[in-house]
């Protein structure tokens, strides 16, 4: 798919990389970064910190990062036996946890997006509404702090 996108704009470059190793990008070179449903899939908190540090370096001083993440109702919820939502989710935390994490690296604004989806008909394999299980979905808008 990526090679076919190149025909629309020859000035666009595509890279395949891990989120915590963006060495091919110059510091301060990216205006906008969008991440939806990604960070909770990183293998551990160390990789998350490395990823946020990489994003901080490549983000332009006036740039923005938009991150969307499902948050849990409370910290340390045991979802390991829930195959419908726990598979691949290694970092499931509350909004407060994510906000504190982001503030270590960036200025952070939080926007609750749950209201937009509260009447969703998305059902999980257990029959529950998806947004009953993730009652708080947040969008974070991050900007660089002074370096």
Image (tube, rainbow, N blue to C red):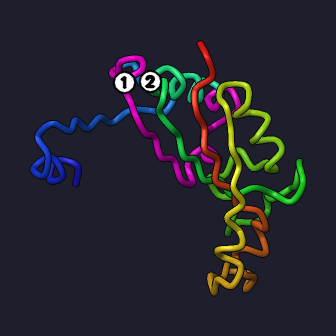
The residue lying at 42 percent from left, 25 percent from top is: 22
Query: Position of 12 compared to 35: left or right?
Result: left
Considering only vertical position in the picture, is 105 above or below 98?
Answer: above
* Disc 2: which residue: 58
Q: Which residue is mark 1?
A: 29
- Tell me if 28 is positioned left or right of 140 in this view: left
Answer whether labels 2 and 1 touch (C-beta < 8 Å): yes
Please give the name of the residue rendered at 29% of the width and 34% of the height, measured from the top-left corner: 15
Name above or below for residue 48 compared with residue 23.
Answer: below
| Residue 34 part of the magenta-drawn span | yes
Percent across and percent down for residue 100 are: 79, 35
Q: Give the answer, above or below, for where 129 lies relative to 45.
A: below
Q: For the image shown, how many numbered marks are present on the structure?
A: 2
Position of residue 24 measured from the top left corner of the image (x, y, whole percent) = 33, 21
Q: Quadrant of the C terminus?
A: top right
Taking depth in this image into account, of 139 and 4 the one nearest to the observer is 139
Residue at horizontal 75 percent and vertical 82 percent from the top: 128
Q: Is residue 54 left or right of residue 119?
A: left
Quarter-wise, where is residue 10 in the image? top left
Q: Which residues are magenta?
A: 24-48
């Amino acid at each position: 798919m990526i090679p076919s996108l190149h025909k629309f704009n020859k000035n666009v470059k595509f890279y395949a990389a891990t989120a915590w190793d963006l060495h091919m990008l110059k510091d301060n070179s990216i205006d906008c970064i969008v991440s939806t449903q990604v960070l909770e899939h990183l293998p551990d908190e160390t990789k998350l910190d490395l990823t946020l540090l990489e994003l901080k370096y490549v983000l332009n001083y006036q740039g923005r990062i938009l991150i969307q993440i499902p948050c849990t109702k409370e910290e340390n919820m045991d979802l390991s036996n829930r195959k419908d939502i726990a598979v691949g989710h290694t970092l499931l935390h509350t909004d407060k946890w994510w906000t504190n994490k982001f503030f270590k690296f960036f200025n952070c604004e939080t926007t609750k997006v749950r209201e937009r989806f509260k009447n969703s008909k998305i059902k999980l394999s257990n029959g529950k509404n998806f947004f009953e299980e993730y009652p708080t979905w947040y969008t974070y808008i991050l900007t660089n702090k002074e370096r």
